Image: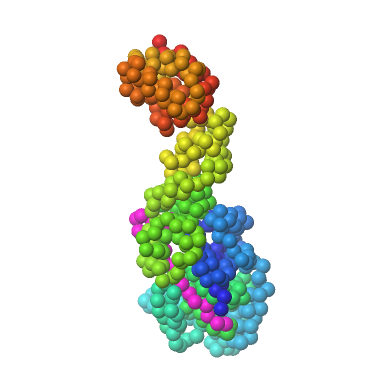
């Protein structure tokens, strides 16, 4: 048997972190078993689905490098197939037309609640109950699945273990609506998973209540059951389901916030699954190690600090040319102009200190935006003997080799000559040249900014002290 898994997002918003995590696990399961992974777009909710959201799904899959073997398959392309399956169930007496109006169903619900009963459809349009009644004119019927009355629905969940529920608990589900028979989620998902020969359905455990209903539809269609595994939810730090209140939940927002895809990938892999104490691992290791036995049954807790830690680790080892490419537009959008020191060298100097690409861009602005020190910084740092040391630096800097060691030697010499401490020279120099009191190692910064620019800025700053 070839393992076939899928991810089936609804394009009604951005791709949620939880869906991405499910995608990761489904993908890894298929890859681990040498199987196939399918992307299906569940766009039957015609009002809420948008092309923009479809694009966000595709972008997110691409960004996370979750490659699929089939798809994207859109449910809206499969309406004839759903119709055919509905016609078959109708013909076999496993589905029927229900003419109950919204008001009628409402009233039914009210009465049940008044009797302290669980609200459920009472089967009034089941063929045996509707005998002799003529459908009311002008009511467009929905199609309901005739759920079995007796027995149990049971499955051995790959994550949660054995689950069973009595059929008596389930009512007759609407499987299609409207003149066009637009299928509902629970029906379309089954027809699709059958047709796409999905062997393992992995999804969030918010769907666990749908599974018994879906199993009954599989049986009615005479199809073999796949295995089901329901992944625990991702919770925010307050123990509530992860949502916008906790920060970014859309995958592409992480891109925008300056995360590397491999960091988010690694982070999501660990959300609800573990391999010993391993926190940082490659995609290949994840595929090799992934199994459902080590998926936690308890919900996973989102932790931004851990993601930031992973991101900074991946940034440290990332190729400088790649980082430069990723960070360049972020520098420009911050008003920087990439001219002067090579961005690759700047990135190499700064990447150890930045947790995200955005932080890296903020830091790199030092080199790409004219930095005019504020009056306050000048007044605070360009004082007394420090001024003399900076003047001496300006005089001698023309004659040295413009590289770190020579610059560092000159600074040490000035410290000794003027009987200062290193910060009394280095900090005023930083302020004068970069407009900031804190930067990475001053000799490296000076080297990158270049002799002409350094001397020009230093002159300007010195001209501002009395
Ligand atoms: N469209 C459903 C969702 O996004 C798919 C659930 C499933 O995997 O069956 O939640």
Q: Position of residue 64 (x, y in %)?
A: 54, 56
Say which quarter of the image contains residue 39.
Answer: bottom right
Q: Residue at x 53, y 42 (%)?
A: 320
Main SS category, magenta section: loop
Please check the rendered image and state whether residue 240 is part of the magenta-colored stretch, yes or no: yes
Residue 82 is left or right of residue 32, and the answer is right
Q: Is residue 411 visible?
A: yes
Q: Is residue 206 visible?
A: no
Viewer-proximal residue, 353 or 117? 353
Is residue 269 on the magenta stretch?
no
Residue 24 in picture, x, y percent from top left: 50, 62
Q: Is residue 223 left or right of residue 352?
A: right
Instruction: Say left or right for 230 vs 344.
Output: left
The residue that appears at 39% across and 27% down in the rendered structure is 437
Name the residue at 61% across, 55% down: 55
Q: How is the image coloured?
A: rainbow
So how many labels did they put on this image? 0
Q: Depth check: give the residue in front, 363 or 163.
A: 363
In percent of width and height, residue 289 lies at: 45, 66
Asked which quadrant contains residue 185, the reply is: bottom right
Relative to 302, does residue 141 appear above or below in the rendering? below
**Which portion, as a residue range, is magenta?**
223-243
Quarter of the image for the C terminus: give it. Answer: top left
Which residue is rendered at x = 44% and y = 21% of the image?
A: 432
Q: Is residue 253 above or below residue 213?
A: above
Q: Quadrant of the N terminus?
A: bottom right
Whether 75 is drawn above or below 415: the answer is below
Residue 77 position in % (x across, y down):
67, 67
């Amino acid at each position: 048997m070839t393992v076939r898994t899928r991810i089936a997002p609804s394009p009604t918003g951005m791709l949620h972190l939880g869906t991405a995590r499910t995608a990761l696990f489904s993908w890894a399961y298929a890859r681990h078993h040498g199987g196939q992974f399918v992307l299906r777009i569940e766009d039957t909710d015609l009002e809420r689905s948008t092309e923009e959201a479809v694009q966000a799904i595709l972008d997110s899959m691409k960004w996370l490098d979750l490659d699929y073997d089939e798809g994207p398959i859109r449910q809206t392309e499969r309406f004839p197939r759903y119709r055919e399956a509905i016609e078959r169930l109708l013909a076999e007496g496993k589905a029927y037309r229900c003419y109950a109006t919204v008001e009628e169903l409402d009233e039914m619900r009210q009465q049940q609640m008044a009797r302290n009963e669980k609200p459920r459809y009472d089967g009034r349009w089941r063929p045996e109950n509707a005998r002799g009644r003529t459908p009311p004119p002008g009511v467009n019927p929905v199609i309901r699945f005739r759920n079995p009355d007796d027995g149990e629905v049971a499955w051995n969940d790959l994550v949660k273990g054995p689950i069973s529920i009595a059929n008596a608990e389930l009512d007759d589900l609407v499987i299609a609506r409207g003149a066009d028979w637009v299928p509902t989620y629970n029906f379309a998902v089954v027809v699709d998973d059958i047709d796409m020969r999905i062997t393992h359905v992995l999804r969030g455990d918010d769907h666990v209540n749908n599974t018994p209903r879906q199993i009954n539809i599989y049986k009615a269609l005479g199809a073999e059951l796949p295995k089901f595994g329901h992944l625990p939810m991702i919770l925010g730090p307050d123990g509530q389901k992860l949502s916008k209140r906790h920060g970014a939940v859309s995958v592409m927002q992480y891109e925008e916030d300056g995360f590397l895809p491999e960091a988010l990938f690694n982070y999501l892999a660990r959300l609800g699954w573990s391999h010993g104490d391993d926190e940082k691992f490659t995609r290949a290791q994840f595929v090799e190690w992934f199994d459902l036995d080590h998926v936690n049954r308890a919900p996973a807790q989102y932790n931004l600090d851990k993601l930031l830690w992973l991101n900074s680790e991946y940034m440290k080892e990332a190729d400088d040319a790649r980082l430069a490419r990723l960070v360049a537009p972020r520098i420009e959008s911050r008003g920087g102009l990439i001219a002067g020191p090579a961005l690759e060298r700047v990135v190499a100097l700064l990447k150890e200190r930045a947790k995200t690409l955005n932080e890296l861009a903020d830091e790199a602005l030092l080199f790409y935006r004219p930095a005019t020190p504020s009056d306050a910084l000048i007044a605070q740092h360009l004082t007394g003997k420090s001024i003399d040391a900076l003047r001496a630096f300006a005089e001698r800097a023309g004659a040295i080799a413009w590289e770190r060691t020579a610059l560092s030697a000159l600074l040490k010499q000035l410290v000794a000559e003027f009987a200062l401490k290193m910060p009394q020279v280095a900090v005023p120099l930083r302020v004068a040249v970069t407009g900031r009191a804190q930067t990475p190692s001053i000799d490296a910064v000076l080297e990158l900014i270049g002799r002409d620019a350094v001397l020009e800025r230093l002159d300007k700053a010195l001209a501002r002290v009395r």
